[in-house]
Amino acid sequence: MSRLRGSVTIDDVARHVGVAKGTVSRVLNNYTDISDDTRKRILKAVQDLGYQPSATARNLKRGRQDTLGIVIPVGHGNGADPFLAQFIDGIARALDESGLDLLVTTAHSREHVIATMKRLIARRKVDGFIVTRTEVDDPRIAYLTEQTFPFVTHGRTGDPTGYAWFDIDNEAAFADGVRHLYSLGHERIGFIGGSPDLNFARQRRDGYRQGLEALGVRHDPELETLQAINEKGGFAGAETLLAHKAPPTALLCVTDALAIGAVQFCRELGLKAGSDVTVIGYDGLPVGEYLDPPLTTFSQSAQEAGGRVARMLIDVLDGKPSRSLQELAKAKLIRRASDGAPSMTSAALANALRDRLNQQPLSGSKGE
Amino acid sequence: MSRLRGSVTIDDVARHVGVAKGTVSRVLNNYTDISDDTRKRILKAVQDLGYQPSATARNLKRGRQDTLGIVIPVGHGNGADPFLAQFIDGIARALDESGLDLLVTTAHSREHVIATMKRLIARRKVDGFIVTRTEVDDPRIAYLTEQTFPFVTHGRTGDPTGYAWFDIDNEAAFADGVRHLYSLGHERIGFIGGSPDLNFARQRRDGYRQGLEALGVRHDPELETLQAINEKGGFAGAETLLAHKAPPTALLCVTDALAIGAVQFCRELGLKAGSDVTVIGYDGLPVGEYLDPPLTTFSQSAQEAGGRVARMLIDVLDGKPSRSLQELAKAKLIRRASDGAPSMTSAALANALRDRLNQQPLSGSKGE
DNA sequence: TTGACTTACAAAACCGGTTTTGTAACACTT
DNA sequence: AAGTGTTACAAAACCGGTTTTGTAAGTCAA
């Protein structure tokens, strides 16, 4: 007589109707060998009693959990990536339509991520994983592939074959970015990137280089800098590149966070972003609209990406071949106000910078 | 011979050692009636075979899922609340220590939230809920209380008894805010709030009023405005309040998003936030540091709050009385640069505003 | 030496579903 | 009329654990 909170079991229903519990199960799973009359009586009892099958019991037999997992790598405080928040939102919405749920876990190191995946797999808590922020050589993908455990990635790896992925054409976006800047009149275009272990960072850098090459502009390695992918990195990156004797008049940044830091650096020097120095980011963060100047950025709708990836994983679980589940989308340039024709040449900028740097000491990058 | 991926079952272990599976279970659950020798042999086999118990099977019998749930209300695009992202991060970290997991779900309406909770409860997918953004009269809390299903809230309701909660002393924070502004020399202090159905919005408004009263300043209802809690609302709120014939020289905003919009409005009018008009937000969003001017704000560490709430829910599940699980924390004012002594009186500000509004038409609030 | 306890484990029941197997009752052939 | 299929369901097995029950062997007291 286990009268636990709200637990109407299949036995209760069966008893109530006077049939075997297997029969109830068959009705609920749309088997055909049930008379119309019985079916109706059972369905009514299910309604009346408010019966809902226990996911646990069902899963035990079926071996499915109706749950997808995502393990978020959280570094030193960079856990609350606003991009990820929207991404997860998109996943959750898509799953809601399919009756699946999302298990969210964080992990603070590469090893921890794998260990967490291992635990979730061994304990059979999830049916598949969504992997984000892919690296060129990604241990998570290696592990899941070896275990033949279903997954979909957001972003590709160095070898984008044999698994399902959704990605943005990063090369094309940054090549376009270069072309755009060039057509605005920028001749020296800088690039603030991140660790080339991260696949998107590497691809965007490649796109930047390809864009220059396509225009016949010589690629100056000194106009490229690699930084931590956060606002501090952007600040430092701008500081580095603008210190060049022939500084760039435009800065292409691998993410909005970097761009925000770069704009901050310009502001502290009294340079106007959007005219004195152009800054372009990537991610389309909503907050970019409220910066001064509003940030020009590449947008890829994190929410849509989340939904897309979730649906792809469902397809994978349904047995679709991963070959047919590889999708490359285009990023869109959202022009706000941090880009524009250069107000002065690189040489003039260098002079202006020299003056300002002598005048006022910098605050340095801020915060923790 | 179900040789499924990585599924070593308890039977495999039992067979391997030559004992009954019940014995293996007893060893793993630290029962005492097992000889040292047998225990060792079983533990070794568990190691060797890499056995990990199936959460599903265990839960079926135990009736626990080792999973907590959070249902995020996502309005019209405001889903990706950066505050929530950090909050979830904090929860996930705390749960990781306890071996629990977090199920994240979104819902787009009050009814949908309840329906989702109902489903998760009926299907027995979670052991308890974390409820955020409490309303003064919150249907979720009514429902969960009626079902006697375990939960903890972040934020109180109109009647904060009978359940476990973690909250910030919103009244105290905003009363302090008023005092701070007054001591800077502000005599007309505006308030941009949100729907008083939201408990934190109502409490912060109350704190604002209490702060004025404590200083003996007459409360002018026209210096209060209620807006949608996002950047657009902040823009509109500033527009409304500054149109007053005796406009406020300082704006206390219920969240950072509102403050960001308010700063935007000032900027478009050519007013300098931090001197011409002081703007203070609430949430301590990291991005506030990179705005122009960097935003002065009350901070409550969303991450810490998430961790605290998660641990409280674990206590609830362990049977601790909810009376002992009610915790009120203090918000801290982070002074950056959007507050300061007023550069002019309310009257002078009114004149300045009249001039600017005649000169240049406003862009209006932007974006979607 | 025998009955009463322990000890250390085997065996079985159970959690709540799904799936397989078995079987009365009826219909349909030949 | 006997054999062969269907139909519609009951009964039982199963998923992989946990918990209860049962019991052989050893220990101890009387």
Image (spheres, coloured by chain):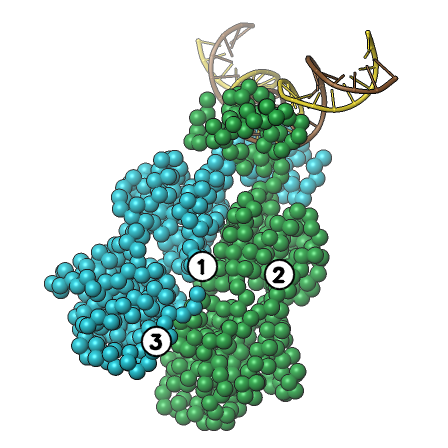
Chain colours: A cyan, B green, C yellow, D brown
Q: Position of residue B362 (x, y in %)?
A: 38, 83
Say which chain tag 1 marks.
A
Quarter of the figure that contains the C terminus of chain B: bottom left
Q: Are marks 3 and 1 in contact (CB under 8 Å)?
A: no
Label 1 sits on residue:
A77
Q: Position of residue B17 (x, y in %)?
A: 54, 21
Label 3 sits on residue:
A362
- Amino acid type, residue under disc 3 in the picture: Leu
Residue at image position (58%, 35%) is B58
Structural distance between the alpha carbons of marks 3 and 2: 41 Å
Q: Nearer the viewer, mark 3 or mark 1?
A: 3
Label 2 sits on residue:
B166
Q: Is residue B324 visible?
A: yes
**B41 to A295, vertically: above or below:** above
- Amino acid type, residue under disc 1 in the picture: Gly
Q: Which mark is residue B33?
A: none
